[in-house]
Amino acid sequence: MLLAKSKRASERLLKSSTKYLEEKLKLTVNREKSRTVSVFAIRNFKFLGFALGRNGKGIYVRVHPKSWKKFKSRLKELSSRKRCQSIKPSLEKIKVYARGWLNYYGIASMKNNIDDINGWLYHLIQSHGRSSRPS
């Protein structure tokens, strides 16, 4: 991803960087995937799992909704009761997965989403505690 102030500058930058990558570094550039996008002209665009766009305060970086959906489904899979194990190994796996995911997406704005995940995990722990007590 290369950032430029104007469309003309971005096209010039794309052309020169493509030339450099192909001639100097002997790398192949996929021209179908290489494009210039104006963050100001479109609402948002996806790049490596991030949603980049513009709002009233400027340009934002968020986690793309599709990436959030995958994250939540993976957490549900890791915490599934069908695995017939105690909560401790499940939480350890969730912790390892969530740490890696959060390190990758750490630059994105996601406070509200993290609060939702925290609430969901709290509920998960509470429900495991209730179901594992002897009656």
Image (spheres, helix red, strand yellow):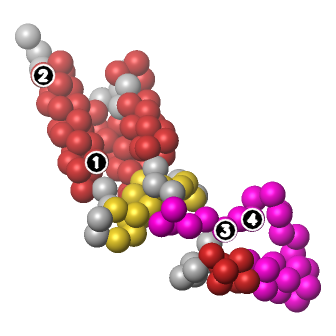
Q: Quadrant of residue 129?
A: top left
Dot label at residue 61: none
Residue 34 lies in the magenta stretch? yes
> Foreground mark, 3 or 1?
3
The residue indicated by pointer 1 is 113
Q: Residue 84 at x, y = what percent?
A: 38, 21
Q: CA distance from mark 4 to mark 3?
A: 7 Å
Nearest to N terminus: mark 4 or mark 2: 4
Question: Is the residue marked by circle 4 packed among few (<14), some (14-19), or many (20+) residues within 10 Å?
Answer: few
- Distance CA(mark 3)–CA(mark 2): 54 Å
- Residue drawn at (48%, 66%) of the image: 40
Can residue 105 be seen here? The reply is no
> In this view, which residue lies farthest toward the top?
135
Kind of element beneath mark 1:
helix
Q: Which mark is residue 130?
A: 2
Mark number displayed over residue 34: 4
Give the extent of the magenta segment.
Answer: 14-41
Residue 104: percent from the left, percent from the top? 47, 62
Residue marked by disc 3: 36
